[in-house]
Amino acid sequence: MDTSDPRHERWPPKRGSPPATSAPRDHLVWAIFNTLYMNFCCLGFVALAFAVKARDRKVSGDVEAARHFSSKARCYNALATAGSVLLPLLLGALIVTGVIHLSKLAHDSVGFFTYQFSGSDDEDQ
């Protein structure tokens, strides 16, 4: 015969500390990559400066300032990457369309620049 009360067998739910917010990312590797390889208008260098500031603030324990600088570093990294990828593609597209336009223009104007010298002239007779 079991005389134990089931209500007393359960442990009360543990109330721990609220989940700690994760430390913000500093985007330092992305900023170094942008600075070394795709430095468009020095945005990679600006991103690197904000990434270093974010890492310094994270190490010192100032999470809000680290989150602020991390956000700025991410923004400048995205701008540097987009500018460094999109501008060469745009430049290449402009060059290709220019070459195509010039080749069509040259092909159409061949008749204008070629003058046929023939032995018979109708005006002279």
Image (spheres, rainbow, N blue to C red):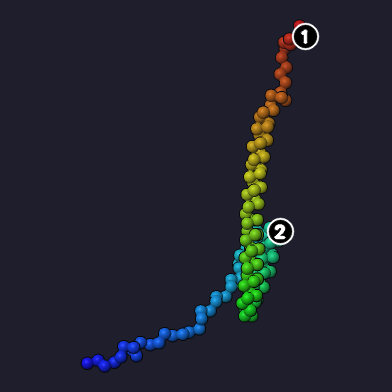
Residue lying at 65% horizontally and 77% vertically, measured from the top left: 57
Relative placement, left or right, of 5 versus 75 is left
From the top left corner, tell me how far across and down residue 42 is, in percent: 71, 61
Pick the residue in front: 34 or 18: 18
Callout 1, which amino acid? Asp
The residue identified by callout 1 is 124
Q: Is residue 57 above or below residue 94?
A: below
Relative placement, left or right, of 103 versus 14 is right
Asked if residue 35 can be seen in this view, the reply is no
Looking at the rendered structure, the secondary structure element under dot 2 is loop
Looking at the rendered structure, the secondary structure element under dot 1 is loop
| Label 2 CA crowd tier, 10 Å (few <14, some 14–19, many 20+) | few
From the top left corner, tell me how far across and down residue 75 is, in percent: 64, 64
The residue identified by callout 2 is 41
**Mark 2 touching mark 1, by CB under 8 A?**
no
User: From the image, which quarter does the C terminus lie in?
Assistant: top right
* Residue 101 occupies quadrant: top right
From the top left corner, tell me how far across and down residue 90 is, in percent: 64, 48
For marks 2 and 1, give the one nearer the viewer: 2
Of the two numbered discs 2 and 1 on the same chain, state the one appearing first in sequence.
Answer: 2
